[in-house]
Image (cartoon, grey):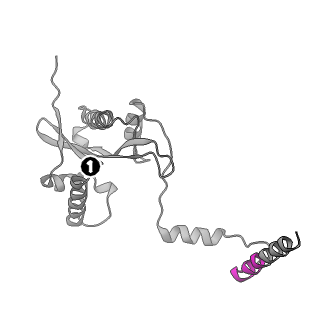
Amino acid sequence: MTRSLVTLRPATAADAPYLAELWADVMRKVGPEDQVGDIQAVLARVEASADELMVVAEYDGEFAGAVVLEATTLSALNLEPVVRALSPHVLPRMRRHGVGSALMDAAVAWAEELGIGHVATAAVSGSRDANRFMARIALGPYAVLRVAPTHAVRARLTAHRRPVAGATGGRQLGQVLAARRSMRRSRAAEG
């Protein structure tokens, strides 16, 4: 019988530098000091919330990975309860030692404790290993989250905007709507 060298515990303020390094690729693109500050703010928020939990994994006593757990709904429109495992990350040198499985097990255990029937997570689209791991543990695709800078979306929307037939501006559309309201009132008065 082999004993697992992976242990889990709640994150503490002392973990902030390790967490900032672990999640640097998914955080704001600022300096390391600011990323540590961001992690400290997240830790304070998580600590104050009954619906969030940050779990750190250690392998043989050494920091190995972490995940943020959030009890929420599947989406803003689908109110099915779910535990979201946000950014489950394992340090590259600690991979293939059961750390990722232990982090996801923490998500499942918390969902069971809360009586929640679903667990969700997201993996970076370019991370083949992470996506394969999630598929192996029964997590299938539900949605695709697409992200772009606001100015880029504005430029593309402006370039693809099609003119409204018969109207060249908002003023003319307003006139059309006013005429329709006037016709409805006339019909209501006649009938």
Q: Secondary structure at mark 1?
A: loop
In-image side of 87 versus 171 (left or right) = left
| Horizontal and vertical percent position of residue 118 | 41, 36
Residue identified by numbered label 1: 50
Residue sitting at x 76%, y 81%: 175
| Horizontal and vertical percent position of residue 92 | 26, 42
| Horizontal and vertical percent position of residue 100 | 28, 36
Is 172 part of what is drawn in magenta? yes
Decide which of 51, 124 is in the foreground and name it: 51
In the image, is residue 103 above or below residue 167? above
Residue sitting at x 46%, y 42%: 80
Quadrant assignment for the N terminus? top left
In-image side of 190 versus 125 (left or right) = right
The residue segment tinted magenta is 168-178
In-image side of 153 versus 166 (left or right) = left
**Residue farthest to the top, as pictured:** 1
| Horizontal and vertical percent position of residue 191 | 88, 68
In-image side of 169 versus 166 (left or right) = left
Decide which of 58, 105 is in the foreground and name it: 105
The amino acid type found where label 1 is placed reads: Ala
